[in-house]
Image (cartoon, grey):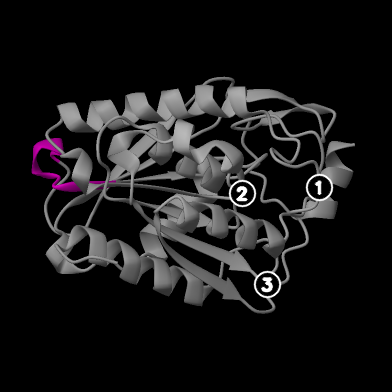
Amino acid sequence: STSDFKNKFGFIFDRARAMGGLLCMGEASGAGGSDAKKFTSALIWMHGLGDTESGWSGMIRADLDLSPSVGACKLVFPRAPTQHVTCNSSRTTSWFDMAELPLGAQDLPPLHGCFLEQAQESAKTLHKIIDDLREEGIPSERIVVGGFSQGGATAMLTCLTYPHRLAGCVCYSGILLGADRLESLATPAAKGLPIFWGHGGSDNVLEPSLQQLGVSALKGAGFRVTAKTYEGVPHSSSRQEMKDASEFVNGLLSGGSS
């Protein structure tokens, strides 16, 4: 049942009724007002399976410590569509279908039971959000895309397949989709993209072996990966991870490099 699924895997579920389409919530962070013309950078953050943007929007706003040198950063929190999820045997918010959970590197390679075509459709939706930010005057090179779990997987796929150079990607407790086809999947603009991948050392939903496998594939394809494993942390985030991600994003958007 859905209740058993929530209890077993510990996903954070919002009490509000999930919307069937994609909802985007934008807000300002750092210096400057709410006028979109004043934004000089942006962070798009995606939630995990069965969740909504509600919890993560509060955590990112409160705990992502952006440097004043970043300037006015627009925070965008899309909501995944509600659709059937095989491993859950029901409809819930998801960026793509998954055949089973939990997963480790040894389970159903190379896609680990994840539906790549559906994930690519979600990535196209995110591409449109990035395009809209560019139309507002924010250069693609100052846009970071990130997310947790399924959201982290979708963030990486979005960045790998976007036709223009982005600032970088942040993945929390995710999975790399298309690890066996990165050369053909990634656009020329994505080559060498900086990626931060944090993962709980005690994650029993998407096991740490998935991080090891994904990081190896990304580095082998020439991506600049900062990988951190947090001992004792389950399928969730931690203060240290948020601190490390803050340093990474500040490096990308303050004119430095990570």
Q: Are marks 1 and 2 in contact (CB under 8 Å)?
A: no
40 or 175: nearer the viewer: 175
Q: Earlier in the sequence, mark 3 or mark 1?
A: 1
Q: Secondary structure at mark 2?
A: loop
- The answer to whether residue 177 of the structure is visible from this angle is no
Quickly name the residue at label 2. Answer: 175
Q: Which residues are magenta?
A: 35-42
**Residue 53 versus residue 225 in the image, above or below:** above
Q: Tell me, for residue 107, which label it has, or none.
A: 1
Q: Earlier in the sequence, mark 2 or mark 3?
A: 2
Q: Quadrant of the C terminus?
A: bottom left
| Residue 41 colored in magenta in the image | yes
Q: Secondary structure at mark 1?
A: loop
Query: Tag 2: Cα neighbours inside 10 Å, few (<14), some, or many (≥20)?
Result: many
Q: Amino acid at mark 1?
A: Asp
Quickly name the residue at label 3. Answer: 201
| Residue 94 colored in magenta in the image | no
Horizontal side, residue 255 vs residue 125: left or right: left
Q: Secondary structure at mark 3?
A: loop
Horizontal side, residue 208 vs residue 87: left or right: left
Q: Are marks 2 and 3 in contact (CB under 8 Å)?
A: no
**Where residue 74 appears, x then y in whole percent?**
25, 45
- The answer to whether residue 213 of the structure is visible from this angle is yes
113 or 130: nearer the viewer: 113
